Image (tube, rainbow, N blue to C red):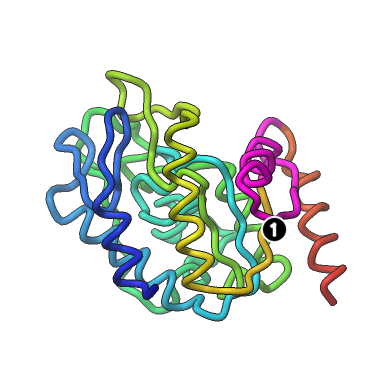
Amino acid sequence: MDIKTFLNNLQAYHAPLVFNPWSEFDTSCDIGEQAPVIRTKNLERYLELRTNAHYLFIAEGLGYQGGHFSGIAITSERILLGHHPDVDYKSVLGDWNYQRTSDPNSSLLNNSQKQKGFNEPTDTAVWNALNRHGLAAFDVILWNIFPFHPYKEGNLLSNRTPTNTELDEGIEYAKMLMELVPGMKVVAIGQKAAGTLARYGVDCQAVPHPSMGGANRFKAAVAEIFANEK
């Protein structure tokens, strides 16, 4: 398994009510046909910088405010564009041609999204915690069990829980990623992710999901993991 093959496998996936950010574009939200090309290059660069990563953090599904537009799991477009003062965008892709893929002229975006790109608070909490321990650049890979964006019918800018069938399909990409970068310690973000990984025989530690007021518990759990590794 190499990065190009992994990306080709990702791009080949298509299913109803699922957006594939690396091979699809939406005329109502994306800047154009170049959007999936930009997102694919982002992910390729992200993985190239982390071929020796020691940790794999896995959440459940890709979100519309995060990887849908950035092409990178648990990473918002706003982080890539440098609009988060507490998250150094260079810790994501180093020296890179950072570009947005959401259309700032789309009527579906609010003023903040038009000016700064999409933002996902969970993504910010995760990156803040990793940066605090000096591991975001470039010792951790962020991923989702279902690496594509599942959305509700009629609303691309929404999230839904992946179905069991989608999880069955998605776990195969996580296994490919673990083959691509062998020996990583797997950390599940949230109990849903932990339970799913356990069901598929993936050994992992679990940390609380940072959403719904869990940011402090998440940070403490991540700190404990890294402290135990020293």
In which quadrant of the rendered image does the C terminus lie? bottom right
| Mark 1 burial class by Cα count in 10 Å: few <14, some 14-19, many 20+ | many
Amino acid type assigned to the residue bearing label 1 in the image: Ala
Label 1 sits on residue: 129
Residue 170 in picture, x, y percent from top left:
44, 45
Residue for point 39% across, 33% down: 150
Secondary structure, mark 1, is helix
Q: Left or right: 164 with respect to 55?
A: left
Q: Please say whether residue 210 is one of the residues in the magenta stretch.
A: yes
Where 151 sits versus 86, above or below?
A: above
The x and y percentages for residue 14 are 25, 41
Looking at the picture, tell me which residue is in the foreground, 19 or 90.
19
- 192 within the magenta span: yes
Q: Residue at x 67, y 49 (%)?
A: 188
Relative side of 224 to 222, left or right: right
Range shown magenta: 189-212
